[in-house]
Image (cartoon, rainbow, N blue to C red):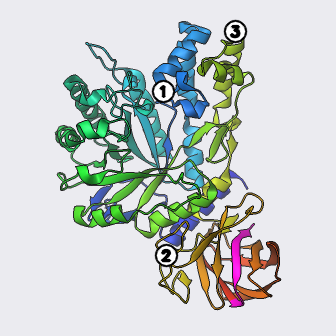
């Protein structure tokens, strides 16, 4: 299917769904109660990707060790290996080609409506006693905004690495693993001045949706939160007041302390165009769908929108679950990140160059490769980062948007509650796994079958679960159900679009049962699985 056909289908689906991703001329966004709206009062749900590793490289995305865990260390590593002059040339080419208009066009084609570029203050402002502006960062950001204007995406500008660092960890390019932003007043002055320059530059640009003042400030584990979190909201107020001197229209988003999630630092909204942000990663084993009720409840008292500025770094099972969970609670999201090296769990993967293992080993303190070997690897990397040379994973994107083709895990039923997304006889019971506040029993299973999750559900006779599935077009899908009977023989009824078919499950091991093709309409579809007779264990249903 060619690109124009995919874009047309995506536009048709967005219109059919009344989706916030619908394409059209960008207008300034603003907050209205708990919603974001455009200038015409239409609700917008920001669904995007984070542009990490571009203006602020992160060592884990290069598969580096401790000696390459942040931008300044990666820069030193490159300079050590190929020399300062070739290193400077490498970085100029890297930043030109890591994110280009081709990336933005592909992001729009996939159906996202926004990007969140991670900025390093050092690309915009030098360090040292006499800090001066750096043009390169502003030019890169100008290019991005221009491309996003062309492809109808919003931009949320993210200060990922503030002057001096706001975390005391590697992710902000901290020079000394300390939150220098809060330790030296000059750094706060520089941050305020930088935000004013950015706001003044884009004050008339509706493609820019919001300013994200600080990424993941003051984590607990570094000790930074305990020392400085009382200073966080006052700093936010100062930056906001300075921005409002030059730009009164753009939204501003605030992140809590401790990786954005400690909202105890917030009092009441101090600006009429604020929204609040948390970050959400599900890394527990076994996988848990982490509860977001504290943010939903706090939204009521703040009377402002809530947004997930980062989520991802796991697998398709949890991507389907989390984006569905957020949207059920009127919360937009940004997947992290768009592109990284040798990763199947993101939309876009960079191939490792030949000889990269030697560069990686050096980042872990092992033997130094030759200049020639390193230069060859870095030259190849500059080619591999171009979108046309990357490996795309549309299955990852389909999971985020809950659309076919894809695999629907049994535990990822909807969030509309009893008699809407599920029916079980004993509503007082609680699952011990995954969705622990709900009565559908999620259980550990063996294997998961061809890359499935390690969890499924059990339904007693007469119980059911329902799933929301999207399709870009009206189409028939080949369907396979993975299930097993719980004693004797069970029958399940699979219903979609007014049509129902029964599948008989014999007692024994997990079985993959082909179904008659399921007919999906364009847009949203509701799939229901009912244990018609006998109890049944369900793992997943695949739709291709």
Q: Quadrant of the N terminus?
A: bottom right
Number of residue marks: 3
User: Is disc 1 placed on a helix, strand or loop?
Assistant: loop
Which picture quadrant has residue 470? Answer: bottom right
Classed neighbour count for the residue bearing mark 1: other residues with Cα under 10 Å, few (<14), some (14–19), many (≥20): many
Whether residue 74 is in magenta: the answer is no
Residue that mark 2 sits on: 438
**Callout 2: SS:** loop
Q: Position of residue 150 (x, y in %)?
A: 49, 45
Q: Can residue 348 be seen in this snapshot?
A: yes
User: Residue, x 23% and y 32% (percent of image)?
Assistant: 192
- At 62% across and 62% down in the image, what residue appears? 9
Number of residues whose C-alpha sits closer than 10 Å to that of mark 3, classed few (under 14), some (14–19) or many (20 or more): few
Q: Is residue 534 magenta?
A: yes
User: Does the CB distance between marks 2 and 3 fall below 8 Å?
Assistant: no
Question: Disc 1 designates what residue?
Answer: 70
Residue at the (56%, 86%) spot, across then down: 424
Q: Is residue 256 left or right of residue 365?
A: left
Between circles 1 and 2, the one closer to the viewer is 2
Give the residue at mark 3: 370
x, y (%) of residue 497?
65, 84
Tell which of 506 and 73 is nearer to you.
506
What residue span does the magenta drawing correspond to?
532-544
Sequence-first tag of 1 and 2: 1
């Amino acid at each position: 299917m060619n690109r124009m056909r995919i874009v047309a289908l995506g536009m048709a689906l967005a219109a059919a769904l009344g989706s916030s991703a619908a394409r059209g001329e960008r207008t300034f966004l603003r907050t209205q109660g708990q919603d974001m709206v455009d200038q015409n009062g239409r609700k917008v749900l920001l669904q995007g990707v984070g542009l990490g590793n571009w203006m602020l490289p992160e060592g884990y995305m290069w598969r580096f060790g401790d000696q390459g865990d942040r931008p300044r260390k990666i820069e030193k590593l490159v300079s050590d290996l190929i020399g300062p002059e070739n290193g400077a040339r490498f970085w100029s080419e890297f930043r030109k080609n890591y994110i280009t208009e081709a990336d933005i066009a592909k992001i729009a084609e996939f159906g996202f409506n926004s990007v969140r570029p991670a900025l390093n203050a050092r690309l915009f402002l030098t360090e040292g006693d006499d800090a001066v502006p750096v043009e390169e960062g502003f030019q890169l950001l100008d290019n991005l905004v221009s491309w996003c204007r062309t492809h109808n995406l919003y931009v949320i500008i993210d200060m990922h690495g503030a002057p001096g660092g706001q975390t005391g960890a590697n992710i902000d390019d901290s020079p000394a693993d300390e939150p220098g932003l809060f330790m030296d007043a000059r750094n706060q002055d520089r941050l305020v001045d930088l935000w004013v320059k950015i706001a003044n530059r884009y004050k008339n640009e509706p493609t820019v949706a919001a300013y994200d003042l600080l990424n993941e400030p003051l984590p607990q584990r570094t000790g930074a939160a305990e020392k400085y979190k009382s200073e966080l909201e006052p700093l936010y107020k100062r930056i906001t007041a300075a921005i409002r001197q030059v730009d009164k229209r753009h939204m501003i988003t605030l992140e809590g302390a401790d990786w954005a999630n400690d909202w105890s630092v917030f009092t009441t909204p101090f600006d009429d165009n604020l929204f609040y942000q948390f970050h959400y990663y599900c890394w527990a084993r076994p996988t848990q769908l982490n509860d977001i009720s504290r943010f939903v409840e706090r939204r009521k008292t703040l009377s402002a929108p809530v947004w997930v500025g980062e989520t991802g770094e796991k697998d398709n099972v949890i991507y389907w679950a989390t984006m569905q969970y957020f949207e059920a609670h009127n919360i937009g999201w940004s997947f992290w990140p768009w592109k990284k090296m040798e990763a199947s769990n993101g939309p876009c993967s960079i191939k490792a160059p030949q000889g990269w293992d030697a560069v990686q080993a050096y980042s872990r303190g092992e033997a130094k490769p030759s200049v020639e070997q390193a230069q060859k690897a870095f030259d190849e990397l500059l080619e591999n980062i171009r979108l046309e040379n990357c490996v795309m994973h549309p299955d990852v994107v389909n999971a985020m948007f809950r659309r076919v083709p894809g695999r629907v895990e049994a535990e990822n039923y909807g969030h509309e509650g009893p008699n809407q997304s599920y029916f079980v006889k004993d509503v007082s019971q609680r699952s011990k796994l995954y969705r622990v506040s709900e009565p559908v029993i999620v259980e550990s299973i063996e294997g998961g079958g061809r890359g499935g999750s390690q969890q499924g559900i059990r339904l007693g006779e007469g119980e059911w679960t329902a799933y929301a599935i999207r399709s870009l077009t009206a189409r028939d899908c080949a369907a396979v159900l993975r299930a097993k009977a719980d004693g004797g023989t069970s029958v399940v009824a699979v219903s979609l679009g007014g049509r129902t078919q029964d599948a008989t499950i014999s007692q024994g091991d997990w079985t993959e049962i082909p179904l008659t093709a399921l007919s999906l309409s364009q847009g949203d579809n509701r799939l229901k699985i009912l244990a018609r007779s006998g109890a049944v264990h369900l793992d997943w249903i695949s739709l291709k």
